[in-house]
């Protein structure tokens, strides 16, 4: 490839925070609030004009998953507070039964309400926020990042932090600093497909409920009338048969997922739709992303037309808005001091250095074939160890969110948004402790991080913690009864 050489130049240093968080998605919010509340002078940079990452930018909904199968809330802390605030702002019904993938709960929310709640929380915590600013480069001395270079409308600028938390989802900072990572699946580098999420408005809910009751066999687990009526936020998974028929007639986009998956939102008649799909896209490649934006947008309109024609209640529905960008499920995973495995997830493994819990099923949209779901006997609550956040060869950097060190399979569970926020809070709290002591990331006393997280209301395994079981969460699903997913734990003892 032809190259040119840029002239070197002096650029202004605009800030020297204790902790710099790169990326304002769920992980970045958890990290920034966690660090600032723990006393660190914290700065957050985000490339778009608002925060939230996939919660808002990619329009992904709902949040998974705060509760174990017994209804115990195992993700609390900053993420739990976000939900409480959303409920107060009537921007979420709170936690409701998951009618799609047999997780104990799901948490739908209004993305506009989310934008404001997150901003309020950052401001109240005293985080210095810089929007419209994209990470560009690092300067490094030995294993320490001394400078982070950003680009924005003011030009090229330098930030000289003591510590950096990479919450860019793609591990942009860590990759740029030369630390090792893998992309996608270990065997061949293939990554999960991308999806343009979008909102549909104008759905007639009573008509839709009547259609669901009349066509329950088309939906996962054929929900009973009482289940449909009781659900305060509907979720639909299925319709494979009518999609197949529509595809044969050219009335459903060929590459889109061959099933409907959508979630009712708190604002009247709105659904978030998770149906577009494109394989073979590298979310760190601008040409691939461009192709994805174009193709998935066409799919989105095709699926909306299908719903209008074939599903009761959707006759007068319309595409309300689409994500600011296509949702990228998977790119780089850092190679940390510990790489989480499928066995850790399915066997509910606790770690001495656990800094957050996860409890979502392993949900893999494979680079080929149908979506696969594996639940660890339906009870898996596991911990994410601190070592999975530590990039090799870097002493003042943490990863948080979907780029932490995990295999392609373990990643299928740890990637979700409630978990990402909890992991972010763990990283932010650790970074603040490091800043207070002038310690490197590997010298931080993780026992103290755990104690600080518990004091902030987080839940961790192996501790005596008051139960805040959610009475509103009633489990009505039989485990593993879905016709659209296979549920098994290859590591569980046969019973
Ligand atoms: C299609 C799809 C469906 C999904 N479904 C669900 C679901 O139903 N429920 C669920 O809980 N999870 C779901 N997920 C997973 C979840 O959305 C992500 O794994 C999660 O958002 C990861 O959090 P994060 O903070 O690491 O990254 P992100 O949410 O991607 O946030 C990263 C942030 O960093 C910013 N950023 C990135 N690069 C730079 C840069 N160079 N400079 C400055 N800022 C930067 C971005 O703008 C963004 O704000 C889904 C994901 C996708 C793509």
Image (cartoon, rainbow, N blue to C red):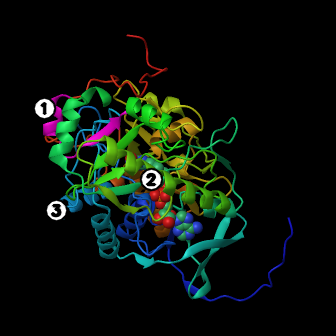
What is the crowding at mark 3: few (fewer than 14 residues within 10 Å), some, or many (at least 20)?
A: few
Question: Of helix, strand and loop, which one carries label 2?
Answer: helix
Q: Are marks 3 and 1 in contact (CB under 8 Å)?
A: no
Query: Which circle's residue, 1 or 2, is located before the other in the chain?
Result: 1
Q: Residue furthest top?
A: 495
Rounded to the nearest angstrom, the CA distance separating label 3 from label 1 is: 27 Å
Rounded to the nearest angstrom, the CA distance separating label 1 from label 2 is: 31 Å
Q: Which mark is residue 88?
A: 3
Rounded to the nearest angstrom, the CA distance separating label 3 from label 2 is: 32 Å
Say whether residue 361 is left or right of residue 203: right
Q: Nearer the viewer, mark 3 or mark 1?
A: 1
Q: Which mark is residue 226?
A: 1
Q: Which residue is mark 2?
A: 300
Q: Nearer the viewer, residue 265 or 423?
A: 265
Residue 132 location in percent, x, y?
50, 78
Q: Which residues are magenta?
A: 224-239
Q: Nearer the viewer, residue 328 or 214?
A: 214
């Amino acid at each position: 490839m032809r190259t040119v050489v840029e002239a070197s130049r002096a650029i202004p240093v605009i800030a020297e925070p204790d902790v710099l968080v790169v990326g304002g998605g769920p992980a970045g919010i958890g990290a920034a609030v966690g660090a600032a509340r723990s006393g660190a002078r914290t700065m957050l940079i985000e490339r778009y004009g608002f925060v939230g990452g996939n919660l808002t930018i990619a329009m992904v909904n709902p949040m998974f998953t705060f509760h174990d199968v017994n209804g115990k809330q195992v993700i609390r802390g900053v993420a739990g507070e976000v939900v409480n605030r959303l409920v107060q702002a009537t921007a979420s019904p709170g936690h409701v039964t998951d009618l799609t993938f047999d997780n104990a709960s799901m948490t739908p929310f209004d993305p506009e309400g989310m934008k404001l709640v997150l901003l309020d929380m950052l401001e109240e915590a005293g985080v210095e926020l810089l929007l419209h600013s994209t990470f560009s480069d690092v300067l490094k001395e030995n294993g320490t990042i001394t400078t982070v270079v950003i680009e924005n409308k003011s030009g090229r600028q330098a930030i000289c932090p003591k510590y950096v938390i990479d919450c860019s989802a793609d591990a942009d900072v860590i990759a740029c600093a030369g630390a090792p990572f893998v992309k996608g699946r270990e065997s061949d580098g293939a990554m999960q497909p991308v999806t343009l999420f979008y909102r549909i408005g104008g759905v007639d809910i009573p008509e839709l409920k009547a259609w669901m009751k009349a066509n329950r066999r088309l939906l996962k687990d054929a929900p009973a009338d009482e289940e449909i009526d009781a659900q305060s936020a509907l979720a639909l998974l299925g319709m494979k048969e009518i999609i197949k028929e529509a595809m044969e007639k050219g009335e459903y986009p060929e590459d889109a997922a061959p099933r409907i998956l959508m979630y009712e939102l708190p604002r009247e008649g709105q659904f978030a739709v998770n149906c577009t799909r494109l394989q073979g896209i590298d979310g760190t490649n601008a040409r691939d992303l461009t192709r994805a934006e174009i193709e998935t947008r066409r799919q989105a309109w095709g699926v909306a037309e299908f719903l209008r024609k074939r599903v009761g209640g959707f006759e007068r529905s319309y595409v309300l808005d689409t994500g600011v960008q296509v949702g990228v499920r998977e790119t780089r995973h850092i190679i940390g001091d510990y790489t989480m495995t499928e066995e850790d997830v399915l066997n509910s493994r606790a770690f001495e250095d656990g800094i957050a819990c996860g409890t979502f099923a392993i949900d893999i949209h494979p680079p080929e074939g149908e979506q696969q779901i594996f639940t660890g006997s339906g009870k898996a609550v596991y911990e994410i160890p601190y070592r999975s956040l530590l990039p090799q060869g870097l002493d003042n950097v943490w990863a948080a969110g979907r780029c932490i060190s995990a295999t392609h399979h373990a990643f299928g569970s740890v990637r979700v948004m409630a978990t990402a926020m909890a992991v972010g809070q763990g990283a932010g709290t650790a970074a603040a402790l490091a800043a207070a002591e002038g310690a490197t990331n590997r010298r931080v006393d993780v026992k103290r991080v755990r104690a600080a997280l518990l004091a902030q209301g987080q839940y961790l395994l192996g501790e005596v913690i008051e139960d805040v079981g959610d009475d509103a969460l009633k489990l009505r699903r039989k485990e593993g009864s879905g016709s659209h997913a296979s549920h098994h734990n290859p590591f569980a003892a046969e019973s």
